[in-house]
Amino acid sequence: MTAHAPEVIAQHQLTADEYGKIVAILGREPSLTELGIFSVMWSEHCSYKSSRLHLRKLPTRGRLVVQGPGENAGIVDIGGGYVIAFKIESHNHPSFIEPFQGAATGVGGILRDIFTMGARPIAVLDSLRFGRLDDPATGARNRRILGGVVAGIAHYGNCFGVPTVGGECIFEPCYDGNPLVNVFALGICKKEEVFYAKAAGAGNPVIYVGARTGRDGIHGASMASAEFTEEAKQKRPNVQVGDPFMEKLLLEACIEAMKTGAIVGIQDMGAAGLTCSTSEMGSRGGVGIEIELDRVPQRETGMTPYEIMLSESQERMLLVARKGREEEVYRVFRKWGLEAAEIGVVTEDGKLRVRHHGAVVAEIPNRELADEAPLYNRPHTHPPRAGLIPDLPVSKVQRTLPTLLGSLDICSKRWIWEQYDYQVRTNTVAGPERTDAAIVRIKETGTSIAISLDGNGRYCYLSPREGAKLAVAESCRNLSTVGARPVAATNCLNFGNPERPEIMAQLVEAIEGMAEACAFFDTPITGGNVSLYNETLGEGIYPTPVLGIVGTLKTAEPVTIPFKNAGRAVMLLGGIGECDDTRFGGTQYAKEIVKQLWGLPPALDLGREQRVQFAVRRIIAEGLAESAHDLSDGGLAVALAECSFGPNEIGALIDLDSDLRPEMLAFHEAPSRILISTEFPKKVAAIAEKYEIEAPVVGVTIEKGIEIRQRTITLGAWEIGALQTAYAQAFESYVR
Amino acid sequence: MKFGVIVFPGSNCDHDAFYAVTTNLGQKAEYIWHDSPRLGDVDAVILPGGFAYGDYLRCGAIARFSPVMGAVGRFAAAGGLVMGFCNGFQILVEAGMLPGALIRNRGLKFVCREVRLRTETVNSPFTNQATVGQILRMPIAHGEGCYFADGRTLDELDAEDRVLFRYVGNPNGSLGDIAGILNRERNVMGMMPHPERASDPLMGSTDGLTIFQSVLHAVVRA
């Protein structure tokens, strides 16, 4: 074979050095098919070549971790003989090109990652970022993307039959040309019934099941590893089309087939399709895999080996069965009306050997292909710095609270989550906007799982390290606020172009911050996803690491956000907190009222944060809190309003003993603060004292209205109905 | 008594219905596979929610042709009790076992939320434990739940006291606020809301149990 022309190599997004390494591995020039295979496996998306060196800094082990990163999903022991499998993944680039199918197949992909491990998916959450819906220039497009993404998630999840129980949705101009669609899924199975994506046993048959292979999604993985340009809009054919009904059948059939005992290993075909599943399964098992492409079920005629190997057609799985027991597997797939075909065999030589019409078209050592992509320690300098403190206008708390409650980030997202079936499977103890973390029960064990997704691009832009720590802290705090103990985490790292040293610096600092906080809270990262090159026309997104943390609690009626009764003490665990002009620059107040971003994110003291969380969990375990809500976007005033939006419309009269300026007092976002209402303030105070945290009684719940005072001077007084209208109806006016 | 829960490819509330009538109601149940030509010894049949056969073409349009639907038809003709919830309702309508049609929600979006239902008749094996006018809280979760029928059919439903539930606050544009109906013989019912999701105190409401308790009462009394 002759060497490929430099432009062909460049089209495959391989550098000259990488090409040289390929030639060295093969001992010859690669065929075009082999070049395609290397290009997807060594793409940023599949190989993590820019991030892997730094990802090693993350804590991944823990007492309850059964499986850390490296498999399709992380596995954590929840006791009672059961484990959960969970992971978060991005589908950012496809969702920009084709919002509905891009988001739908994002859900499909992560669901397969879960059930390929033998776990039945029981919850989905999503973390979304879009450009502003009210921007005169880009608003119309952003609304179209939002509508498509939400409908796509709804379409896939609802039909598949998994509840979408929560998530978050934030709007910033930096996501205009680059929305983020991060989908988290969690499943459950018996501890001894976990399956791994590992091939073993020379001579065992390799079986293909599910949808047929077509020409869709070819080079999706490499598309997700490049910045967007004007031509990106031409890439629509690269986005796959999802079929949730097929996926539902695949789920039921796989779970049933796994129970036969005839399956050795199984992996879904996601990014890089057949290429990735064969080489990774082979590599993990230290074996070879030989396949004949003529036997691959195909939807179109005349497909080349290159196209078959790189197709990202959805709803396909690859499995290795025990020789002689294939029929048991086929029987199950026939029952569910699914196609299954033996396409190859496990070999001893450690190579991925691909035949087409009998002739070998690719022969590559699995380990080098799957695990030895070049790793880059890309240069990193300093993250970009935000501007200086602007002149801060004086804004009345009275007028500001309704404005913030009706702002895009803070207002109710009911319009979104009502399109999701958040109840199917009848496990949803707490769905969207009822509590700080979603709660799904495990019927089999009497335990429940709490889940929270958190990320704050503004904080991370101001300080990637502190922002990432704050995201971990917030996610753990959300779990603690419902009484759950955080046990493990998954992460989705959304960043710009790592070849720019200042962007690489954001990535490195965020990972290091996350590592520190996850180690501190004992929430190891069990898997996740890195999405780089989130740039359009040279404009990078804010660094947006998203954390998905899961916790466990005993199944019981949850402690929800709203105040339940008048006459209860309102206590602020963690105290009023501190802030100054510098630390005020990343808040929602800065965003919506000052319309700028400056300074630093709120200051976090990990030790204090943890003591507050210990205390609130104790308080909830002892049944002392009637309501609980942590302070986050919009600070104390926004949290107080949200606590008043319950069915009984119980409000509160608050008097704060503080020297802060009124608007800073009401809206600063210092972490480690939780607002509770209680009938037992003395018992709560005793627990707070034990954990050495402040827990002032800041007021009392009342029948009607909300009032905030500062040392007896009224800063604002509102009717709950008016605030609720602003909060509940805003989103609808933005999407119209 | 024993409930039969039909499982079509794409059913996804089958486990929930099974759990509601076994764990929450305390009765027996079994799953019945869609290509089964017989129902076995069940006392009542549930067609659960979901997306049978992907709901391709039209909701319930393919499911009506599955072998088990012949058996369900014969069971109903012999007086057996048949319930269709959500997708099950859509299938019963497509199969001609209930009148009318379920079309796209007026808001053109899938809607998942708790609704309030007013009980319109207690003269049925599905509501004999309720009182007329009783308000039941339970969720809906559908994209095509807008009940539609011609004027004559609607008049007939009214005249023959065959409307089981009407929405208080219509969520989907259903004509006459209709949420659930009976066939003429009063042994087949369909409703868009999900009683199986409102059968456990942890799920926020147990009003759905009223329907299952009514069926139990009807079967045990018979």
Image (cartoon, coloured by chain):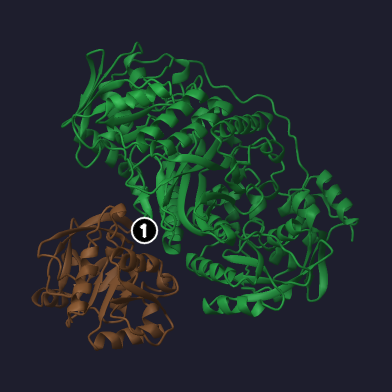
Chain colours: A green, B brown
Chain where mark 1 sits: A
Left or right placement of residue A433 versus residue A610 in this view: left
Q: Is residue B196 above or below residue A429?
A: below
Q: Position of residue A343 (x, y in %)?
A: 71, 73
At 33% across and 13% down in the image, what residue appears?
A: A658
Q: Position of residue B217 (x, y in %)?
A: 19, 73
Q: Which of A322 and B162 lies nearest the eye of the viewer? A: A322
Left or right placement of residue A180 versus residue A433 in this view: right
Where the N terminus of chain A falls, by quadrant?
Answer: bottom right
Q: Position of residue B201 (x, y in %)?
A: 28, 54
At 71% across and 64% down in the image, what residue appears?
A: A309
Residue A594: tell me if it is visible. no
Task: Tell me the amino acid under the disc marked 1.
Answer: Thr
Asked which secondary structure carries label 1, the reply is loop
Q: Residue furthest top?
A: A659
Q: Is residue B31 above or below residue A385?
A: below
Left or right placement of residue B10 versus residue A11 in this view: left
Q: Residues within 10 Å of mark 1 (few under 14, many from 20)?
A: many
At 23% across and 75% down in the image, what residue appears?
A: B189
Q: Position of residue A462 (x, y in %)?
A: 54, 25
Q: Is residue B84 above or below residue A432?
A: below
Q: Is residue A522 above or below residue A344?
A: above
What residue is shown with label 1?
A426
Can you tell which quarter of the image residue B47 is in?
bottom left
Q: Which of A312 and A261 lies nearest the eye of the viewer? A: A261
